[in-house]
């Protein structure tokens, strides 16, 4: 079998010594997959993807990107390793224009400006039209598109996003998700945290439910849609069985 795009191996990470938030998490993402991380508020979903991206200190375990150990790579070097991270908030510079946001992303990876921007504008024609507009004046959906476009400037192999649908109307969620599918179709692997469980399972090939810093349920999206515990937790179906809970 080919090397996994991402392998997270028994990862422990947190903000304060002795208080791990990610508690022995395991996750594998194959090249070309879209994988969703689901789970209740406070489960550690953001902490997990931030730890993978080098933004939360790791106290145990390993992270491999296409077989290369990136556990100790600092966040600002991750794009050079091929991992681009889109945080949930503050993911664009609101006082800079759309074009400046993209040019800055190109400068960070020392890419030739036009060569870096052209393919991204081709994929996001709305951003080309709005290139002179301050990013703060974009709609929520457009701003999220700009955040994704900024991440793609670095030509990552793995795109990691924390709740790209947060605060968006259902129509905009479907537009952003359609764009993520397009991104995957260009050969980029996608890992995303999502609260929007139904949409996430419609988008993703596979998903993992994180509870108290560990993955509790992992499977294909079809499997998770059938899973009684997922149904009880998220999909409003009563199954008569107890949902997965901490300590279970
Ligand atoms: N910067 C931080 N410093 C200290 N503790 C933090 C920090 N960020 C998050 N935590 C704690 O880590 C735990 C998990 O938070 P995290 O944001 O990873 O969860 P989440 O699954 O992404 O939740 P949500 O669904 O609300 O986004 C929470 O108890 C939170 O208080
Ligand atoms: Mg979060």
Image (tube, rainbow, N blue to C red):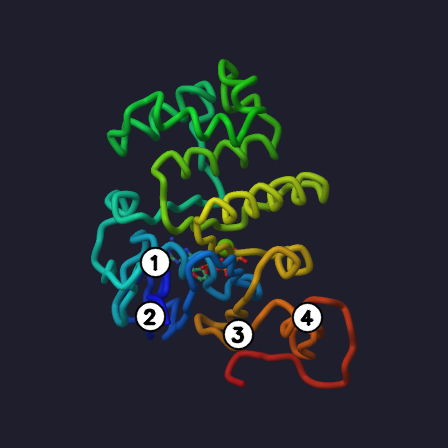
186 up-or-down from 216: above or below:
above
- Residue wearing tag 1: 52
Classify mark 3: helix, strand or loop: strand
The disc, 3 or 4, on the residue closer to the chain's N-terminal end is: 3
**Secondary element at tag 2:** strand
Cα–Cα span, label 1 and label 4: 26 Å
Mark 1 crowdedness (10 Å alpha carbons): few <14, some 14-19, many ≥20: many
Pointer 1 or 4: first along the chain: 1
Q: Is residue 246 left or right of residue 31?
A: right
Badge 3 vs badge 1, beta-carbon distance below 8 Å = no
So how many labels did they put on this image?
4
Asked which quadrant contains residue 4, the reply is bottom left
Q: Mark 2 vs mark 3: which is more N-terminal?
A: 2
Residue at image x 68%, y 84%? 242
CB contact under 8 Å: marks 4 and 2: no
Residues at marks 4 and 2, CA–CA distance in whole angstroms: 26 Å
Residue 201: x and y, percent? Answer: 63, 61
Crowd band around label 2 with a 10 angstrom C-alpha radius: few (<14), some (14–19), many (20+): many
209 lies above or below 35: below
Residue hosting label 3: 218
Disc 2 target residue: 11
CA–CA distance in space, label 2 to label 1: 9 Å
Q: Which residue in the structure is indicated by mark 4?
A: 225
Task: Point out residue 106 in the picture as x, y percentages from the top left corner.
Answer: 32, 28
């Amino acid at each position: 079998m080919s090397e996994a795009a991402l392998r997270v191996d028994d990862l422990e990470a947190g903000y304060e010594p002795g208080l791990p938030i990610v508690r022995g998490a395991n996750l594998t993402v194959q090249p070309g997959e879209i994988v969703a991380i689901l789970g209740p508020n406070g489960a550690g979903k953001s902490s997990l993807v931030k730890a993978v991206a080098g933004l939360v200190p790791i106290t145990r375990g390993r992270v491999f990107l296409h077989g290369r150990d990136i556990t100790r790579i600092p966040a600002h070097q991750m794009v050079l390793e091929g991992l681009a991270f889109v945080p949930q908030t503050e993911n664009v510079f609101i006082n800079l224009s759309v074009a400046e946001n993209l040019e800055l992303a190109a400068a960070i990876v020392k890419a030739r400006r036009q060569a870096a921007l052209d393919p991204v504008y081709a994929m996001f024609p709305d951003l080309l039209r709005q290139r002179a507009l301050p990013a703060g004046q974009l709609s929520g959906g457009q701003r999220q598109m700009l955040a994704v476009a900024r991440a793609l400037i670095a030509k990552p192999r793995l795109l990691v996003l924390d709740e790209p649908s947060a605060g968006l109307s259902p129509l905009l969620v479907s537009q952003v998700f359609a764009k993520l599918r397009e991104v995957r179709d260009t050969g980029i692997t996608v890992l995303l945290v999502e609260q929007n469980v139904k949409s996430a399972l419609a988008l993703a090939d596979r998903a993992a439910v994180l509870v108290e810093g560990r993955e509790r349920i992992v499977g294909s999206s079809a499997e998770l849609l059938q899973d009684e515990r997922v149904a009880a937790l998220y999909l409003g179906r009563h199954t008569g069985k107890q949902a997965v809970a901490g300590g279970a």
